[in-house]
Image (cartoon, rainbow, N blue to C red):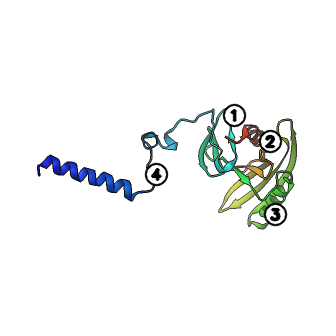
């Protein structure tokens, strides 16, 4: 058998064995050539597939970008705020019409945590979203003091709540970050 014939036979066997022995989907050329998330420039217009989340962001407010996504959780960052981030997730244990339950849980978590303190909470009536509720707690862990501002809004399907959690170095200025969370909440839309 000639050298070329042997090489062709071995290559054919490898192709057949590879096709039969690997049931896992292989990444497409586009996926394997895509740069890592940290290499990509922030994109203002975002349309994420709904998947298990049942929601997506139609258009993020200026300066915001999605840094990661896992299932129904998104992590977002604001340009120039390296020590702050927002985590958005579905809260299936909180019905969309019982948002106060989420605030109560946040207050209890702060009180139970060593170094935790409930700071304030409230409700905001919005034309687009109806009434949304919020709570801010402070945590002092390992000499690092952070504030945890959470907004609860109804999931577009109304079966659950969506929480938008803003974690940032402790500050007496809750209002600016609350405005940011309401703007992010308004960019959430149902489905794909």
Residue positioned 59% across, 34% down in the render: 43
* Residue 115: numbered disc: none
The residue that disc 2 covers is: 175
> Which residue is at the front of the view, 107 or 11?
11
The first of marks 3 and 4 along the sequence is 4
Q: Are marks 1 and 2 in contact (CB under 8 Å)?
A: no
Report helix, strand or loop for mark 4.
loop
The residue that disc 4 covers is: 25
CA gap, disc 4 and disc 1: 36 Å
The first of marks 4 and 2 along the sequence is 4
CA gap, disc 3 and disc 4: 44 Å
Residue positioned 87% across, 48% down in the render: 122
Q: Are marks 4 and 1 in contact (CB under 8 Å)?
A: no
CA gap, disc 3 and disc 1: 32 Å
Is residue 48 left or right of 171 when viewed as pictured?
left
Residue positioned 68% across, 35% down in the render: 58
Q: Position of residue 47 (x, y in %)?
A: 63, 37
The residue that disc 1 covers is: 61
Report helix, strand or loop for mark 2.
helix
Q: Crowding near pointer 2: few (<14 within 10 Å), some, many (20+)?
A: few
The residue that disc 3 covers is: 108
CA gap, disc 4 and disc 2: 47 Å
CA gap, disc 3 and disc 2: 22 Å
Q: Quadrant of residue 141?
A: bottom right
Is residue 68 left or right of 12 when viewed as pictured?
right
């Amino acid at each position: 058998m000639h050298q070329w014939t042997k090489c062709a036979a071995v290559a054919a066997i490898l192709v057949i064995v590879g096709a039969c022995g690997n049931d896992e989907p292989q990444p497409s050329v586009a996926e394997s050539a895509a740069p890592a998330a940290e290499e990509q420039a922030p994109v203002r217009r975002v349309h994420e597939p709904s998947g298990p989340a049942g929601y997506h962001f139609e258009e993020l407010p200026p300066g915001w970008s999605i840094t990661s996504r896992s299932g129904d959780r998104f992590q977002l960052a604001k340009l120039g705020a390296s020590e702050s981030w927002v985590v958005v997730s579905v809260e299936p244990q909180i019905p969309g019409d019982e948002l106060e339950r989420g605030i109560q849980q946040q207050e209890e978590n702060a009180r139970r945590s060593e170094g935790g303190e409930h700071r304030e909470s409230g409700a905001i009536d919005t034309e687009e979203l109806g009434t949304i509720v919020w709570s801010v707690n402070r945590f002092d862990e390992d000499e690092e003091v952070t504030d945890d501002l959470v907004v609860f809004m109804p999931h577009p399907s109304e079966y659950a709540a969506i929480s938008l959690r803003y974690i940032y170095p402790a500050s007496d200025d809750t209002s600016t970050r609350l405005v940011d969370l309401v703007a992010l909440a308004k960019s959430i839309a149902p489905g794909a």
